[in-house]
């Protein structure tokens, strides 16, 4: 049986240093996560090769407020369930390159009615929001990058938005 003198308790300074290191790592991770969730992502129209189905229904609107561009809308294929959903507002330049905005999906009654499904059709709503300083200045077409149930299509809305320098 080992004697009580063979075990040395750690010094308080070492414990405080380890606690500070853990806190710094957690704060660093949180900072990276917040930055990632607020940063627009590069997108190319070629990444959405499928044609837009004739049964596609959508609505989208953009507004500026306090230096932020906010885009709200919904999209779905009529009478199609949402089994996998990734819908984002996109800003495309004339050459097909552009940005998707940081987005969160939300329930939307119009999407539910258009999808024709009381349970799975309501998650076609989205809100994208980004500070205009995080976007390159220029004129963009407001689009919907739509990936659901194996369909990967870029919906061109015909609306344009201007991002000022």
Image (spheres, rainbow, N blue to C red):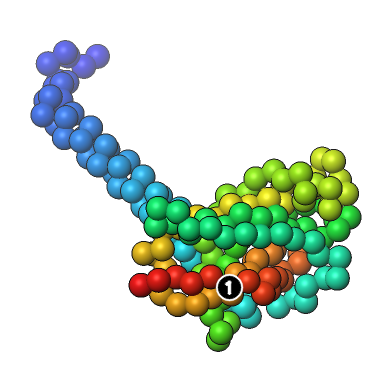
Quarter of image, res 14? top left
The residue at the far bottom in this view is 95
The residue that disc 1 covers is 160
Residue 120 percent coordinates (x, y)? 80, 45
Q: Is residue 93 above or below residue 130?
A: below
**Residue 56 location, x and y as percent?**
81, 65
Q: Is residue 85 visible?
A: no
The N terminus sits in image quarter = top left
Q: Residue at x 26, y 37 (%)?
A: 23
SS label for mark 1 = strand
From the top left corner, tell me how far across and down residue 162 is, in percent: 48, 72
Residue 62 visible within the image? yes
Give the quarter of the figure containing the C terminus.
bottom left
Q: Residue at x 11, y 25 (%)?
A: 11
Who is closer to the viewer here, 93 or 8?
93
- Give residue 127's position: percent from left, percent from top: 58, 52
Q: Would you call the spot at circle 1 few (<14 residues within 10 Å), some (14-19), or many (20 or more)?
A: some
Residue at position x 22%, y 40% from top?
21
Q: Residue at x 84, y 53 (%)?
A: 114
* Tally of numbered discs: 1
């Amino acid at each position: 049986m080992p004697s009580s003198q063979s075990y040395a308790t750690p010094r308080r300074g070492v414990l405080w240093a380890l606690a500070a290191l853990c806190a710094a790592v957690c704060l660093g991770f949180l900072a990276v996560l917040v930055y990632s969730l607020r940063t627009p992502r590069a997108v190319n129209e070629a990444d959405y090769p499928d044609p837009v189905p004739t049964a596609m229904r959508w609505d989208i609107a953009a507004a500026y407020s306090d230096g932020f561009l906010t885009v709200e809308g919904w999209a779905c294929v009529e009478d199609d369930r949402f089994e996998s959903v990734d819908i984002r507002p996109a800003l495309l330049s004339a050459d097909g390159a552009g940005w998707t905005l940081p987005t969160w999906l939300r329930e939307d009654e119009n999407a539910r009615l258009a999808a024709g499904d009381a349970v799975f059709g309501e998650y076609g709503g989205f809100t994208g929001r980004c500070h205009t300083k995080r976007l390159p200045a220029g004129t963009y077409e407001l689009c919907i990058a739509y990936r659901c149930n194996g369909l990967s299509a870029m919906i061109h809305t015909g609306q344009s938005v201007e991002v000022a320098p």
